[in-house]
Amino acid sequence: MILRLPAVLAATSLAASLALTAPSLTAGPAGPERARPAAPTPAAPVTVTPTPAAPAAAAPTSGAAAHAPSAPTPRAPTAAPLPRITEIRIDKSEHTLELVAGGEIVRSYRVAIGPGGPGPKRYEGDRRTPVGTYRVAGRIKGLFHQFLMVSYPNEEDRRRFAELKRRGEVPPGRGIGHSIGIHGVGGGLRAGVHKETDWTLGCIALDDDEIDEIARRTPDGAKIVITD
């Protein structure tokens, strides 16, 4: 059979196209080989932007410092509570008043006393500050600013007064005395200046802010010891 030229050309073109796209088949002595796949088309390169690495943690300090606990957050200092006063000591010759808590002197003040001189109080109006052991017998707010009552007279004072009266050494109309206290000045005298002289009728006088502190810290019933 004779093929026409256009058909021959078409067949040739088809064969060439198949040769480029279809797997090649070759015969071998053991029979036909398996078809070999065409080589894959290389993929387009992918650009990857690296993520910045997190900063590395600081290496621990070697030695004891590596295991030391963190410093605690500082707290605001709190004021220590004022100790409760158990005793008041007054020295007439030194013109001092001391506050005692648990056997320890925790505060000391300078005071003014009566001008009657040393020794115990003898009778009303002698202007002596008593000598002996007493108690805080109460308080009067507003009298000389603030007034802590001293439990004068005690039993020893009464015995002394009775003996003085028996001997005729008490002026007529005089009693044993009363209303002895530890007090302020109530604004009538300047703070501190009044202590330069002994001006009371037998009491113990301080500045107003001082008697406020003493009254605040000293309960009724606290011991008062007055010595020459």
Image (cartoon, rainbow, N blue to C red):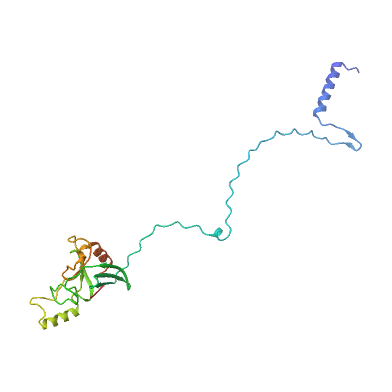
Query: Residue 146 appears at what percent x and percent y?
Result: 21, 64
Quadrant containing the C terminus in the rendered view: bottom left
On screen, 167 above or below 113? below
Q: Residue at x 87, y 33 (%)?
A: 26
The location of residue 118, given as percent across then percent down, is 19, 75
Left or right of 222, for residue 9: right
* Front-lying residue, 3 or 204: 204
Residue 160 can be seen, yes or no: yes
Count of numbered marks: 0
- Image quadrant of residue 159? bottom left
**The N terminus lies in which quarter of the figure?**
top right
**Extreme residue toward the left, this view:** 172
What residue appears at the point 55 percent right and 59 percent down from the top-left corner? 65
State the residue in front, 194 or 226: 194
Give the farthest residue toward the front. Answer: 196
| Position in image of residue 38 (x %, y %) | 79, 33
Q: Let me know if residue 146 appears in the view.
A: no
**Is residue 73 left or right of 187 when viewed as pictured?**
right
Q: Quadrant of residue 161?
A: bottom left
Res. 5 image quadrant: top right
